[in-house]
Amino acid sequence: MSEAQRAALERVALAMAGRGWAVFPIMPNRKWPPAWHRKDTCPGRGPCAAGHVTPESLATTDPETITRVWATAPYNVAVFPGKSGWHVIDCDIRKPDEAPGLDGWEELQALAAARGGPLPDTWTTSTPSGGRQLWYPVPPGVRLGSTVKWIAEHVDTRGWGGYALAPGSVREDGAYELLDDTEGPPLAGWLVQVSVKLPPTANSGRTQKPVAAPSAYAAKALREEPDRVRNAPPGQRNKTLSTAAYALGQLVGARLLDEHSARTELRAAVAAWNTPDSAVKDDGVIETSLAAGIDNPRRITPRHGTRRAA
């Protein structure tokens, strides 16, 4: 790269830091940081002389440090969203060898429509491959990690533990560009909900088989219990969510209802509250209460009609 390109990338790094976004240098023409050692193999010298550190912990907004580092090479600019109080929704395009279908942006729009949206305009960048990245501020008190193919097949997220390249960064196949400089609102509640990646749900050891189609009884419960959650007034929401998740869990345990369907409908109902500050807690209530219900399956006793003799 030329001196002009180096100076341009330095200006990008300073501009990102001016927004309060912590940046870290990436080797020219690349998207990956330099190989970094693990804590158990830390040499204890250089940047780690005072203790093991990571690129995320070294990412900075200090203009003097940025000027000194970017003066040495035309580094690409990595932003660590989690540390900066932001969350990035990364929509990929389909690969040439994939069957026809939705790309990441289309999957995200479909998810917004299914969840009741919205998908607000916000600061957005394009990637060299043709994808796009949406940058949203994280609501106070919310801490989100990074995910891969969790939201949808072609949608990743970048939060704590991840980073995204700033517009102006260059790879061999093209550059990252700014598509929209809108100052977007905080991450919508439904996006917080779908971005929370939970550990695998514990089970009691039973082998759970999929339910092909719920009975009319189970289908009715799958409508009514999430509706109770959706319409619960503040102050009663936690109890309502717990009892609804437990009730649906009992039907899952009785193999009258699919666990994935129960969890999805409950999360959609909670998203209607638009309370991102309690997203992690609400998901925990769903998981705990579902599991408790599954461990105590509902006993359904068939009713046998009696025919009176003539």
Image (cartoon, rainbow, N blue to C red):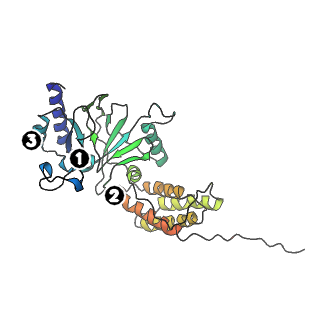
Disc number lying in front (3 or 1): 1
Residue 12 is situated, as x and y percent measured from the top left of the image, at 19, 34
* Residue 217 left/right relative to 306: left
The mark nearer the N terminus, 2 or 3, is 3
Instruction: Check disc 3 and report the residue beneath it.
Output: 64
Mark 3 to mark 1 CA distance (whole Å): 24 Å
Please state which amino acid type lies under the numbered disc 2: Asp
Question: Can you give x and y, in whole percent of width and height, for residue 238 in the image?
Answer: 42, 66
Marker disc for residue 120? none
Q: CA distance from mark 2 to mark 1?
A: 33 Å
Q: Are marks 3 and 1 in contact (CB under 8 Å)?
A: no
Front label number (2 vs 3) = 3
Residue assigned mark 2: 277
| Mark 2 vs 1, N-terminal side | 1
Identify which amino acid the numbered label 3 is placed on: Glu
Q: What's the residue type where badge 1 is placed?
A: Trp
Circle on res. 36 = 1
The quadrant of the picture occupied by the C terminus is: bottom right
Which is more N-terminal, label 1 or label 3?
A: 1
Q: Residue at x 64, y 69 (%)?
A: 300
Mark 2 vs 1: CB contact within 8 A: no
The answer to whether the residue labelled 2 contacts the one labelled 3, judged by CB atoms less than 8 Å apart, is: no
**Picture quarter containing residue 172?**
top left
Position in image of residue 273 (x %, y %): 42, 56
Please rate how many residues cluster around mark 1, counting C-alpha atoms within 10 Å: few if below 14, some from 14 to 19, many from 20. Answer: few
How crowded pointer 2 is (Cα within 10 Å; few <14, some 14-19, many 20+) is rated as: some
Residue 19 visible from this viewpoint: no
| Residue depicted at 54% across the width and 66% down the height | 206
- Seen at 23% across and 56% down, the residue is 40
